[in-house]
Amino acid sequence: MPLQVTLVSLDFESEEAPTTFTFDKDEIRIGRSDDNDIVLSSSAASDLHAKMVVERGGDDPRLLLEDLGSTNGSVVGTTRLLPNVPHEIASRERIIIADYLIKPQLINVDKQKVPVPEPCVAVDSSSRNLERASKSAGIFLSNMDREFGFFKPTSSQNNLAVLGDVLAGSVVEESGVHAPRETQVVTQPEVCEEEHLSIEGKEALPVPTTIRGTVGSEDITDLHFSVIKLLTLEGVVTHQGKPLPGVVVSAGELGESVTDERGRFLFARIPAGTAYNLKFEKRPFRFETESDVSGELLENICFLVRATRLCTISGKIESNGNPVPDILVCGGKLGKARTDRDGIYRFENIPEGTSYSLTPELEGYAISSPKAKTFNQEVVPCE
């Protein structure tokens, strides 16, 4: 069962065409250096970025992707992979590495191949063949719309799925529809705007489109484009003035980002006007920002996020070595806690730097503690 991998550049200014590789081995390496099985021509890729492994232990082979400690990471779906931890992926699942979309697929050569819609339709200059070519282009692009889940248009302009209805003139040959002359639409069929991702976050971008052709004997006045500004949502998370790595930043439909060793997170190339709502998660911390973390993205934003560690105070009340249950311990502004059947009391989620004072409420006993000297001191970060 060979491994087939499709590689598509997400750099809209690049002329690099989608490429499909077929491998008969069970491990392939992906990276920027030339000795990789799949070479990524991007400065955002590490020399040895990731490896893909086929495990054939059972009836159904497993496909695994492992990020090899790359600088900018690897994303499967909306999940950023932990370095050096194999992650199981599904056939044709979308992978983002640097500026590339990668789709692996295990090919069963024993099964009959399912025919794929053919984007190139040879026609002559007659009106009948022109109509047939335009219809074929529309069907092909409509199939792309269903299979890859393109977003609906953000304005009144037509999207790629209905271009077959508005093409006028003969269609010239490039990488879309083939015909002798005039108008042609070139697109990258493997790029699904629903799955566009930045290195640490999700993007929702229109499919790159180029209209090429030759001017005939009449004016052409309906070749319109719709553009939208792309913005960046980023920030830095710190704890006691130092960068805090490993914080999961959730942004709803934009996906997730994980702070790096410098505490940075990034959601890039986001269409202006996109709604966002950031949530931060890493135990045992809580997070504060000086500005609102939800709204509509109208300009580039950089958040400064401060993390505070949440601590636990606990202890035990004993009498002659035996636990004393159901004793109320007054913690002042921390509240109250009762000992359990093992004599244990606990105060949780206390912000570091909080002063405390603990007093057991117990009549008929003389109370002592070897830690009594620490009363009214500050809580130190819990390890």
Image: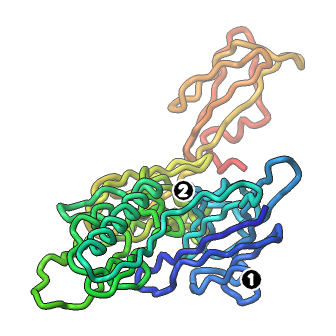
Residue found at the very far top of the displayed protein:
364
Q: Nearer the viewer, residue 283 or 71?
A: 71
In-image side of 116 versus 64 (left or right): left
Q: Is residue 16 left or right of residue 135?
A: right
The residue that label 1 is drawn on is: 36
Callout 2–callout 1 Cβ contact below 8 Å = no
Q: In the shown orientation, is residue 228 left or right of residue 11?
A: left
In percent of the image, x 24 and y 64: which residue is there? 165
On-image quarter of the N terminus: bottom right
Q: Is residue 187 above or below residue 294?
A: below
Count of numbered marks: 2
Q: Residue 46 at x, y = what percent?
A: 66, 81
Q: Which residue is mark 2?
A: 78
Q: Is residue 272 visible?
A: no
| Residue 289 x %, y % | 40, 56
Chain-order first, disc 2 or disc 1: 1
Mark in front: 2 vs 1: 1
